[in-house]
Each structure stands twice: as structure tokens, then as C-alpha cells.
Amino acid sequence: MKLTGSKILLESFVKEGVDTIFGYPGGTVINIYDDLMDYPIKHILTRHEQAAVHAADGYARATGKVGVAIATSGPGATNTITGIATAYMDSIPLVVITGQVPTPLIGNDAFQEADIIGITRPITKHNYLVKDVKDLALTIKKAFFIARTGRPGPVVIDLPKDVQLASTNYEYPDKVELRGYKPTYSGNARMVEKATKMILAAKRPVIYVGGGASLTDAHQELLELAEKINAPVTTTLMGMASFPKTHRLSLGMLGMHGTYYANMAVTNADVLIALGARFDDRVTGKIATFAPHAKIIHVDIDPTSIKKNVRVDLPIVGDLKDVLRKIVKSLDGVQDEVNEMVAGLQAWHEEITGWRKDQPMTYKTSAQEIKPQFVIEKLRELSNDDAIITTEVGQHQMWTAQFFDFLKPRTFLSSGGLGTMGFGLPAALGAQAAFPNRQVIDVSGDGSFQMNSQELATLVQYRLPVKIVILNNNFLGMVRQWQQLFFDKRYSQTCLELPIDFTKLAEAYGATGLRATKPEEVADVIKTAFATDGPVIMEFKISREENVMPMVPAGAGLNEMVLAS
Amino acid sequence: MRHTISVLVENEFGVLTRVAGLFSGRGFNIESLSVAPTLDPTISRMTIVTSGDDQILEQINKQLNKLIDTIKVIDFTGEDYVEREMALIKVTAEDDTRAEILRICDIFRGKVVDVTPKCYTVEVTGSPAKVSAIVDLLRPMGIKELVRTGPVVLGRGPKAWKAG
Ligand SMILES: Cc1ncc(C[n+]2csc(CCOP(=O)(O)OP(=O)(O)O)c2C)c(N)n1
């Protein structure tokens, strides 16, 4: 079958099982958009290419499938950069298609030409410029394969206009072999054996879970291990929803804005079982005082993550789900020893309970002002257990992580690695496109919301009923907090002087706007929002100078937390 | 510590930038880098001389392996290997230095590959230390221009890397 490059692309999408793509048209992708009308692929027209990539990312995080975005050359392509970098930092599988000027013009500073391969090289898992239509089908196959396997990540395919127009015989390959790319999935048996021994010898074990648990859907295996050895579990922001926060063994999040008891547990642990986590500096604080007494077992599919920041006593390279199964199986074989070990953890659990009682995750309530933490708690109370929560970046993100009890995997989508303001709304859009019948909620600050607020139009147009919570403090709150604590309250450029009427903004787009200014209005606003069809903005005027506490100051150790004043 | 690493890569568009970008992006040193296709024209072989402590070298090895286009990474540190570098040295040749240049050249088994009334271009091959030694000896005569290829290496003995 002879097909044009443009049709080969769409045909291959269908073969890859792609049902929804996010994008924005332009001159160098106009042929693809023309052909798109004849294909059974739903295209969602965002209002910005950055949002298209975040939406594909949200779709991928919520479903586990590869997200697909498309943009035109030049400015369209450069607008995708923040989206690609965000996905790269959090290991999210994406295929991003960019149009490119015709091959004879490449390098000539042609109209809307940008060297997107050069620009995206350090923020993609891999990228391809396709110069010959004969290579296109195989390249697409490789791109999806690379994006979803091993440590997932975004792959860019730059597709010049003449290649889209040229024709060739089309056959989509069944398999792909890359001689330089063979991820290790199966955990080494000898290492698993050693890990088992190390775990059985533990008196003060802690399980530390990162984004790898959700990327491999290993929540069940994680629960089994934790319960089997009765070890407390702390997660990173990315690991958040992989372990039910209400579980008796849950310590919540660790790190800069983690719980006091999680940080104390890690500091005093004798065996730290790190699962699909990468010891980010926001998690470890000062390396020298991070888990100083612990033997560290580190399971990760990416060998470069191991021993990058911290010493590791026992590395296991492999797929987390596979390794967890093997560890649990190996423990099954020595149930007596497991029982003995668990019996020895009494003192450890008592110590942790002490820290919990000493410094619970709490806040000062108020009858006059709306406390942001209160809004988050109410939101949890009034939403479904399988509601998908996205966030932007700032205080509201940390309050969500601290006070929302996530119970189910893939229900918390947040930009952890890059920390991208403007991520949450388009990510919610993507998640809602994947799950039209689930509650999808973007928790936002008033600053972040304005970074991609144009996507309200997309939500309304495609009837995507995302509910948006704006915790409005009229500040770039997180930066203001740092200025308060570390810059003597010199609030340089963090007060968003102009108050915005977000309810009117919602209405301008044809969405619904609700507002609460007093604590007693909070629950009603949330209930009304959930009872309303279509997208809703819930604006909460919160206590303006509330801080995210407790906190490990930058550069300090996890044991040096500043506690709520 | 100095390490000499051979990297077999797909001979594809942009692969050199990927490797060079990896080193610059992560703050690793490159002392020299040479690259050319192998017997199999779809594979190129890079020889990279770098330095760093054990932890950095471990990261360099892992990061190189992580590149999709990388087929094999071989760190020759601690191995038995042959290391050779070539240099072309353009040196001022006056009446009173010509003979000395030729003598030095001879000792190092170099060749004069270009001659003008006032200038010789010397070609020399050897270990980087040997190349540095001849450079030092010729320096007093007045080196006008110098180019070194950076070393290339092969392990000693019959064992060979199949893909290379
Ligand atoms: C794109 C981008 N620019 C700047 C920052 C730095 N930054 C981190 S948090 C923050 C303030 C966010 O303000 P807002 O969205 O209102 O949330 P709040 O902290 O008030 O809850 C800023 C500017 C960022 N993370 N991302």
C-alpha cells in the first residue's frame, strides 16, 4: 500500500492504539491536519502548544499509555519545550510530533524554522529527524517503543513537510530491535537474595517510594511488601498515590515539606528500601545527614539513578514490579524469619508513634479566614475516592500533598521534577479526556492558574468538566514564603497587585464560577461545583500569608526541620 | 584519574552531539575525542579521554550506556591496551636547526611530510606521552602550528569487540 508520510503517521498512530491526540495546527503540519479528518483519532485543540504537551502528559500519567502531541515548526515547536522538559523530568512516556520546514530548506533560516532536534536533545529520551519517508514507519515504531519501555520518557519526531508529502510503500513493523537499547527488567536473583537478607536483619526499616511505583503500576506489590514486613512507608511527591495515605504504615511524604515523622524515621532508619526513587535534593536535604545510619537498598530501572547522589549498599537494576514480586516471594520462603523480624519492630513503631504524636501534620484552624489546608481537607471529604487531582506548583501543591489523603494509584498528577507552574490545568484536561466520567480536579494558585488559563476554552469546547480550585492568596505564595523566612520579609515582585475576578473569567469562557470568602462557605461551594455540569472554577479567598509547614530549609538536613510556629 | 573510553555508537545523524552534549550538560571533562566509522559502516567508534573520581567515571559509563545510540562502552582503565596518537607539527627550520629537527624526528620515528625553505611539517605517531615529548623537544626551534588527533586505543591480544 503506497501512502504519503502524513497518512503513514496517522495510520501508525492507529496501529499503536492511539485514540486521542492533543495539538495545534500550522503551516508545516497542515497536511497532517487535513488527513486527520479521515482518521478515527480524536484531536483536542488546546489553545497553546505547551498545554497540548501537558495535556498529553496528563493523559499518560492518568492512563499509563503513551501521550501524543503535535505542533507546527518554529514557534509551535518551541512552545512545546516546557511540556517536554516537564515530562522528561518525571519520566512520562510521550511522543511529540513537530512539523519542520522542507528538507532542502533545513539550515537556511527558513520561515518558521527552529532546530528542534538540537533544542530538545537534552530534554528527551531520544529524538528523530526523519529525512526520508521510507524511514518513517520504523521511526514511529521506535519512538513509541522507546517512550514506553525502560525508564519512560518523551520522544520527539521532527517531520519535514516534504517528507509528509512524499509517498512510499507502507507496512508497520511488528517488532523493533535496537542493538544499543536493552533495558534490564528482571531483577538479579542474587541481589534480590541479598536484599531479603538485609531486610530480615532490619530493626528500623523504612520503605521510600518514588514515581517508579506508579510508572510500573506496582502499588499492589508495594502494599504486599510493606504489610509483610510491617515497615513504614514514606513517598515522594511522585510516589504519593502509590500507597494509601490512610494506611497505618503510611508516613506521608518525606523531604522539604514532608512530615516530621517521615523525616525522623528516615534519619533514624537502619535499612532504607528505596523503590523507583532518585534521591532528589528536595527529598534528601543535606546529603551528609540523609539516612546516616541506614544501609540503602535501591531498586531502579535506570542504572544512572543509582549512586548518582547518595551511596547505595545494594543496587538492584530492574522493573520495580518484577523486583518487588521477587523480594516478596523470597520472603515467603522464610516466613519464620519474617515473623521474627516483624516481632522485633515493636520499639521502632513505638518511636515513630511518638514522633507522630509529637508533631502531627496539622495547621491552625480559623473561624474567620479560609485556611487553604481546610479547603484541601474538605475537597477530599466531598470528592470520590478515584477522583484525579492535578496541581500547579507552589504552596497549594504542597498543601495538597500534605492534606489530601490519596488512596488510589494514578490519582495525583503533579510536576515533581521540573516544578512547572501552568502544568495542572492542561494535565487535568488530558486526564479528563481519558476518563470522561471521573472527577478531575486541578488545585491551583492564582499565579499558576494564569500561566495556562486559556485552556478554559478547551475545557468548555470539548465538554471536559474539570473542576478547578484556586487557592487565591493574591501572592506568588511559595516565593513569598521564602522571602518571609529567608529575605527578611522583603516581598520583591511576589504580590500579584491586580486582584482578578476568577468567577467572571470562568463566565467569559462559558464555564461556571463560584467563590467562597468565609470558611462556612467552603463546603457548599465544593458541593455545588460537583453538582454542576461542565468546568467550574472554585475561587477560595484564603488567608494570605499562610505558610507551608513544616519545612527543611534549603541546604539543611532532614533532621533540622523548622516546625510550625 | 585519567580514563580512556571507547564508545561504539550507531553511525547516525547527530550522534556526536549527543555524546558531546552529555559531557557538557553534566559537567564531565573531555580531554580529547576522536571518532570515525568502524569496519561495519553503520557503527562509529569514539575514543574519549576523560578524568574524574570513581563515582564520576561510574556515572560517565552509565550515562553513555543510557544513550539509545550507544552500542557498547569500554573503559580501558586497568586493561592491557595499545594507545596511539598522531600529531602534525609545523616547526621553523633555520639553517642552524634543520639538522637537529631531523635528528629528533629520526629518534621518534617521525617523518617530515612537508618542506619549505623556512619550515618543516613533521608527522609523528606514538603514545600521548611520546607525542608530548617530541613537542617539548621541538618547541625551542619554534613550533608555528600543532595538531594532535587525540589518542585511539585497542585492547591487546586476540580478543576483539565483535561490533567494532
Ligand atoms: C514556570 C514557573 N515559573 C516560576 C516558578 C517559580 N515559582 C515556584 S512557586 C511560585 C509561586 C506560585 O504561585 P501560585 O501559583 O499563586 O501558588 P501559591 O504558592 O501561592 O500557592 C513560583 C513563581 C515556577 N515553579 N514555574
Image: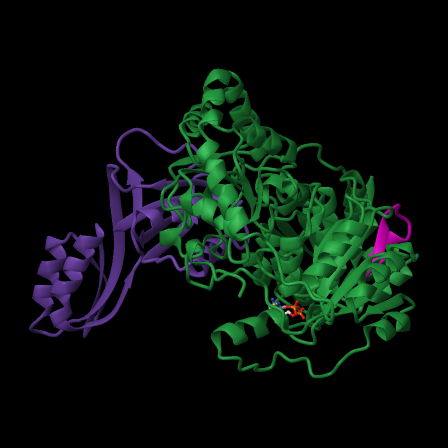
Chain colours: A green, B purple
Rendered image quadrant of residue B119:
bottom left
Q: Visible in this render: residue B4?
A: yes
x and y, in percent, of residue A460 in the image: 89, 62
The answer to whether residue A434 is above or below residue A527 is above
Image-based side of A503 in relation to A5, left or right: right
Q: Which residues are magenta?
A: A36-46
- Taking the magenta stretch, the answer to whether it contains residue A508 is no
Given residues A280 and A397, the one toward you in this image is A397
The answer to whether residue A357 is above or below residue A363 is above
x and y, in percent, of residue B25 in the image: 46, 60
Q: Quadrant of the C terminus of chain B?
A: top left
Q: How many marks?
A: 0
The answer to whether residue A135 is above or below residue A82 is above
Q: Give the residue at x 49% y 21%.
A: A339
Given residues A190 and A511, the one toward you in this image is A511
Given residues A431 and A327, the one toward you in this image is A327
